[in-house]
């Protein structure tokens, strides 16, 4: 039987689905708004409709054997329950796995979105030749998924990888988590905006309004265009990323750090200072083997990671 799987990336605003063939290629896609406010039953029903639509892309001898779905945490991957992610309040405590299993009659795996993206990169992207890897997401927030000898390190309470809240400056800015000087305050998209505005104000310039004219992406564009203040903000963000990678390298003794998320689209504006800085904050014997690279799969990473998880499930027939 020509068995396919489905990978689903469920986000706060949109849901992306991919039909993945036995050669691990996405052969058909669907995208719908999340509309979490409608509640878990309605959202899962709409996902079920899209899965049925994807069946039309199957070859004559094909079937969908299993499904993997990922979403922001916190979640209970063992029991398949989404807990209370701040950006998806309509789906709090939703038994996602059971709802989809009942609706579709196939096995379902639920995973954290960063971990799913890490699995995608590890098996099908830049991590294919590595035994271990850390996937760092730099976007609205900062987090990581750690793969050691092919196994995801989750920690005792499944919180492993919250590196965005490692303290880089204990006298620094107050973070929403309650601590100070967290890594996230230096390199996330919102942090780039705040730091750029602060630099503008310090030199006496008129600071643009955040909601109307400035975004993290725009700050990186300004840096690429030669804006010295934006370039300074990006350089400091990259240096902070380098310190963060060095900290993880000294703790985990892993060489490969794959950087994904929206902010990494700035490329070497972020990664070059990270590569320059990491060796200075670790043993020479550790820093010389560290590699910091951009993710290769972009938004396909979570879908392919979910499809890989689906293939690991016991399938009948």
Image (tube, helix red, strand yellow):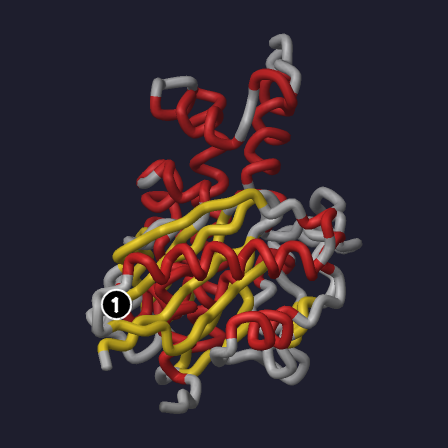
Q: Residue at x 68, y 72 (%)?
A: 95
Q: Which residue appears farthest toward the front when viewing the image?
A: 60
Q: Quadrant of residue 53?
A: bottom left
Q: Is residue 306 above or below residue 10?
A: below
Q: Quadrant of residue 65?
A: bottom left
Q: Position of residue 157 (x, y in %)?
A: 68, 80
Q: Which residue appears farthest toward the right when viewing the image?
A: 178
Q: Quadrant of residue 269?
A: top left
Q: Residue at x 57, y 60 (%)?
A: 71
**Label 1 belongs to which residue?**
21
Quadrant housing the N terminus:
bottom left
In the foreground, 134 or 289: 134
Q: Position of residue 196 (x, y in %)?
A: 57, 26
Question: Left or right of 239: which side holds 46?
Answer: right
Question: Left or right of 266: which side holds 42?
Answer: right
Q: Residue at x 46, y 51 (%)?
A: 16
Question: Left or right of 137: which side holds 158?
Answer: right
State whether residue 279 appears in this view: no
Q: Position of residue 27 (x, y in %)?
A: 26, 57
Q: Position of residue 76 (x, y in %)?
A: 65, 76
- Label 1 CA crowd tier, 10 Å (few <14, some 14–19, many 20+): many
Quadrant housing the C terminus:
bottom left
Q: Residue at x 46, y 60 (%)?
A: 8
Number of marks present in the image shown: 1
User: Of helix, strand and loop, which one carries label 1?
Assistant: loop
State whether residue 211 appears in this view: yes
């Amino acid at each position: 039987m020509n068995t396919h799987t489905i990978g689903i990336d469920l986000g706060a605003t949109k849901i992306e689905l991919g039909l993945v063939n036995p050669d691990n290629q996405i052969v058909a896609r669907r995208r719908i708004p999340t509309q979490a406010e409608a509640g878990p039953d309605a959202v899962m029903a709409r996902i079920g409709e899209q899965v049925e639509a994807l069946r039309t892309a199957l070859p004559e001898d094909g079937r969908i054997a299993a499904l993997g779905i990922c979403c922001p945490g916190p979640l209970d991957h063992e029991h398949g329950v989404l807990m209370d992610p701040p950006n998806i309040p309509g789906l709090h405590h939703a038994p996602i796995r059971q709802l989809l299993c009942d609706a579709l009659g196939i096995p379902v795996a639920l995973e954290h979105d960063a971990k799913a993206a890490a699995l995608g990169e590890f098996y099908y992207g830049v991590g294919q030749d590595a035994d271990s890897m850390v996937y760092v997401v730099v976007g609205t927030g900062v987090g990581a998924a750690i793969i050691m000898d092919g196994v995801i390190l989750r920690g005792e309470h499944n919180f492993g990888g919250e590196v965005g809240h490692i303290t880089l400056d204990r006298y620094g800015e107050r973070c929403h988590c309650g601590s100070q000087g967290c890594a996230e305050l230096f390199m996330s998209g919102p942090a780039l905006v705040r730091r750029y505005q602060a630099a503008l104000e310090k030199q006496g310039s008129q600071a643009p309004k955040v909601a109307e004219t400035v975004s993290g992406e725009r700050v990186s564009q300004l840096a690429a265009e030669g804006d010295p203040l934006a370039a300074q903000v990006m350089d400091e963000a990259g240096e902070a990323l380098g310190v963060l990678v060095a900290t993880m390298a000294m703790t985990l003794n892993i060489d490969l750090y794959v950087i994904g998320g929206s902010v990494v689209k700035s490329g070497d504006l972020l990664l070059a200072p990270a590569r320059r800085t990491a060796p200075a904050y670790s043993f020479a014997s550790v820093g010389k083997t560290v590699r910091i690279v951009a993710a290769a799969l972009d938004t396909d990473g979570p879908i392919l990671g979910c499809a890989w998880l689906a293939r690991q499930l016991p399938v009948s027939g």
